[in-house]
Image (cartoon, helix red, strand yellow):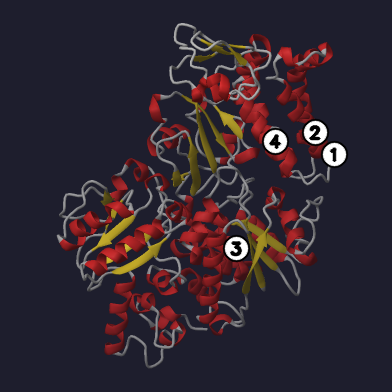
């Protein structure tokens, strides 16, 4: 089969659109080929329009990922349309995904004909009239909300890439997120989409694709970091009438939103990666397993698959080749354990999502007993770039054993929350203090929880650790899927351990005893630590609390060594890292009966400063357990044995007389 690139110049191939919406008919050497000068001129111009380099009216880009919509993007769009109509202005409004700077939403870009694309942040419906007047009517810069320019300009606007949030990033997976319209296949093609797929169909056999991915050093971005090429090679060697490919988009980690943002912002990139993966292993059908809580991601995936079928990129004998491949979407019900590959397979098969022992591994006997490869969204998003630019290019990025980049979802006590992509080998401190902007309100950094519930909490003394699979494992954490939760001095590490254990214990499928019972016992020990003595009359229980911290490590080792799947095997990590780096905080709770962060209510003491109390009685009336007593006009006091530490008295007091120790 001849490649389209054998017949068409790069510009013509990029534009890839004909009156019948079948770009393959334009680029197959027929009468619409670039040899026809009129056709070449027409399609080159169209391609420039799709790449936003040529247009006759102003373009307005509005970030409409979930973060943008939550910040009010739809209301901003409505206000912009209303203002344009009011001023009798003509402009084209394009919806984009998330550029990653979630803390600055709603983000709106303006590009005037022949001008530079400028990004503006924190746009609200109220600011729209002044925004439109300044940028479109006066053709100037809305300086109050300017974020940066996408390319060099003569307007005095700094480049977007020089913003501290973007400066230390390197975008491969997120290359087009927030830049292009995620619902337009033509725009994706105009920006180089499907060139990698065309390359493998035209110039490479399946084994050559596998070797290229292996040579790149790409490792699975879903958690364990298994070499992607090795997994594909194992499946490629299997002989079967059907093979399956699965994209794991069941993102269940608290604080993680990487997969969701990529699927919302650049779904064609994920699908192209799956098409290449399907070709490499000889799969006939692929599934995208996406949690039902991601309605926008699912909607855009459905649109992507429909358009790919319409353009002849999915289905039988794709682009006149012998390769047939199609995709389906499977909605997950939100079970965290279904992020484990064998549980995910069971869910697709219509069974309860529960892990099963291995071997056999999915590459031998997976979905419906057939060879199956499972990779996550980020892994597939790297594939097309590797094929297009070469394995040597990709392997030149990162460290010796961890190649490429990693996407993280930054959240917690930081200035700049959002989605970032950094080269492997970047230091944790660079992510926290440069990209994320450090800790707000002059608070002190305490820890970063990396890798989700399966990861660990790392203190400031290990912040020079590099972001790579082995380095993070050495300090008691793991890469995981990319959750990155930053905590400040007001965070209690005992409470953090309780939170993650509560999550893990409730999400355990219950199939194996170590995970089902072991995590429950660990949770009980952690929950007893901050209980006040006065609330416990059983002396044996008090003694058990002191012994519990000693048993935590031994119990953790048993759970890690004997659990069936990765959920149980990694469940103790938050506790183990807490005991390793924050043992003093655990001992403070046990021996000093104190929580420095002021989080554990049973260890707090509420009192009233009689020099400030005016005896107004407001706190007395608000207290639901009658723990406050006193006469009107005289200082009140709190009965400690009755107080439940609800904080209602603090909210009610107008004189700041309530003290918490």
Q: Is residue 435 above or below residue 346?
A: above
Frontmost of labels 1 and 4 is: 4
Q: Residue shown at 15%/55% (left/top)?
A: 154
Are there few (<14), some (14-19), or many (20+) residues within 10 Å of tag 3?
many
For this rendering, which residue is in front, 661 or 275?
661
Instruction: For mark 3, give the secondary structure.
Output: helix
The mark that comes first in sequence, 3 or 4, is: 3
- Residue that extends furthest to the front in the rendered view of this protein: 632
Q: CA distance from mark 3 to mark 2?
A: 41 Å
The mark that comes first in sequence, 3 or 1, is: 3
- In the picture of the structure, the residue carrying the numbered disc 3 is 210
- In the picture of the structure, the residue carrying the numbered disc 2 is 518
- In the picture of the structure, the residue carrying the numbered disc 1 is 513
Are there few (<14), some (14-19), or many (20+) residues within 10 Å of tag 2?
many
Instruction: For mark 2, give the secondary structure.
Output: helix
Q: CA distance from mark 3 to mark 1?
A: 39 Å
- Residue that extends furthest to the top in the rendered view of this protein: 611
Q: Residue shown at 52%/66% (left/top)?
A: 300
Q: CA distance from mark 2 to mark 4?
A: 12 Å
The mark that comes first in sequence, 1 or 2, is: 1
Instruction: For mark 1, give the secondary structure.
Output: helix
- In the picture of the structure, the residue carrying the numbered disc 4 is 502
Q: CA distance from mark 1 to mark 4?
A: 17 Å
The mark that comes first in sequence, 2 or 4, is: 4
**Image quarter (top left, top right, bottom left or bottom right) of the C terminus:** top right
* Circles 1 and 2: CB atoms closer than 8 Å: yes
Note whether residue 597 is visible: no
Are there few (<14), some (14-19), or many (20+) residues within 10 Å of tag 1?
some
Q: CA distance from mark 1 to mark 2?
A: 7 Å
Q: Is residue 6 above or below residue 645?
A: below
């Amino acid at each position: 089969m001849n490649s389209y690139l054998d017949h068409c110049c790069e510009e013509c191939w990029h534009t890839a659109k004909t009156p019948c919406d079948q770009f393959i008919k334009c680029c197959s050497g027929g009468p619409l080929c670039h040899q026809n000068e009129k056709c070449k001129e027409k399609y080159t111009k169209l391609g420039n329009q799709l790449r936003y380099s040529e247009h006759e009216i102003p373009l307005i880009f509005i970030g409409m990922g979930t973060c943008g919509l939550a910040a009010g993007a739809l209301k901003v769009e409505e206000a912009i349309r209303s203002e344009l109509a009011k001023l009798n202005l003509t402009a084209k409004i394009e919806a984009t995904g998330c550029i990653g700077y979630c803390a600055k939403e709603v983000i709106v870009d303006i590009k005037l004909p022949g001008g530079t694309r400028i990004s503006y942040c924190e746009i609200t419906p109220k600011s729209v009239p002044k925004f439109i007047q300044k940028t479109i009517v006066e053709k100037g810069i809305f300086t109050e909300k300017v974020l940066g320019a996408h390319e060099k300009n003569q307007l005095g606007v700094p480049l977007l890439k020089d913003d501290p949030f973007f400066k230390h990033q390197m975008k491969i997976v997120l290359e087009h997120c927030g830049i292009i319209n995620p619902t337009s296949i033509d725009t994706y093609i105009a920006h180089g989409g499907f060139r990698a797929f065309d390359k493998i169909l035209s110039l490479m056999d399946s084994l050559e694709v596998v070797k290229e991915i292996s040579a790149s050093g790409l490792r699975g971005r879903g958690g364990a970091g298994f070499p992607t090429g090795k997994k594909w090679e194992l499946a490629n060697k299997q002989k079967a009438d059907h093979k399956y490919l699965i994209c794991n988009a069941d993102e269940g980690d608290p604080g993680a939103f990487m997969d969701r943002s990529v699927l919302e912002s650049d779904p064609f990139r994920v699908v192209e990666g799956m098409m290449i993966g399907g070709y490499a292993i000889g799969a006939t059908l692929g599934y995208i397993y996406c949690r039902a809580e991601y309605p926008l991601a699912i909607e855009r995936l459905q649109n992507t698959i429909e358009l790919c079928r319409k353009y002849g990129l999915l289905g039988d004998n794709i682009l006149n080749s012998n390769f047939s491949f199609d995709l389906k979407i499977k909605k997950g019900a939100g079970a965290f354990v279904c992020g484990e590959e064998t549980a995910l397979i069971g869910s697709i098969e219509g069974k309860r999502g529960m892990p099963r022992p291995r071997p056999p591994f999915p590459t031998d006997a997976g979905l419906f007993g057939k060879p199956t490869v499972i990779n996550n969204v980020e892994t597939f998003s790297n594939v097309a770039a590797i094929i297009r630019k070469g394995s040597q290019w990709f392997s030149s990025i990162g460290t010796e054993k961890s190649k490429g980049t990693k996407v993280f979802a930054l959240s917690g006590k930081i200035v700049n929350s959002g989605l970032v992509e950094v080269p492997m080998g970047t230091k944790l401190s660079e992510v926290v203090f440069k990209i994320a902007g450090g800790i707000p309100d002059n608070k002190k950094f305490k820890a970063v929880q990396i890798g989700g519930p399966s990861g660990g909490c790392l203190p400031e003394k290990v912040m020079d650790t590099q972001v790579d699979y082995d380095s993070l494992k050495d300090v008691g954490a793991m890469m995981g899927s990319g959750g990155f939760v930053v905590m400040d001095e007001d965070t209690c590490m005992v409470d953090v351990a309780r939170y993650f254990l509560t999550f893990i214990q409730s999400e355990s499928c219950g199939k194996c005893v170590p995970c089902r019972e072991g995590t429950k016992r660990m949770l009980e020990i952690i929950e007893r630590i901050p209980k006040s003595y006065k609330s416990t009359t059983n002396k044996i229980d008090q003694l058990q609390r002191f012994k519990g911290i000693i048993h935590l490590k031994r119990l953790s080792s048993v759970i890690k060594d004997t659990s069936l799947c990765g959920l149980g095997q990694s469940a103790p990590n938050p506790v183990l890292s807490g005991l390793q780096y924050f043992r003093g905080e655990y001992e403070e709770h046990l021996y000093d009966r104190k929580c420095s962060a002021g989080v554990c209510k049973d260890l707090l003491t509420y009192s009233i400063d009689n020099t400030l109390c005016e005896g107004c009685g407001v706190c007395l009336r608000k207290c639901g357990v009658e723990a406050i007593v006193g006469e009107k006009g005289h200082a009140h006091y709190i009965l400690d044995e009755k107080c439940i530490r609800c904080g209602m008295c603090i909210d009610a007091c107008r004189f700041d007389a309530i003290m918490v120790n």
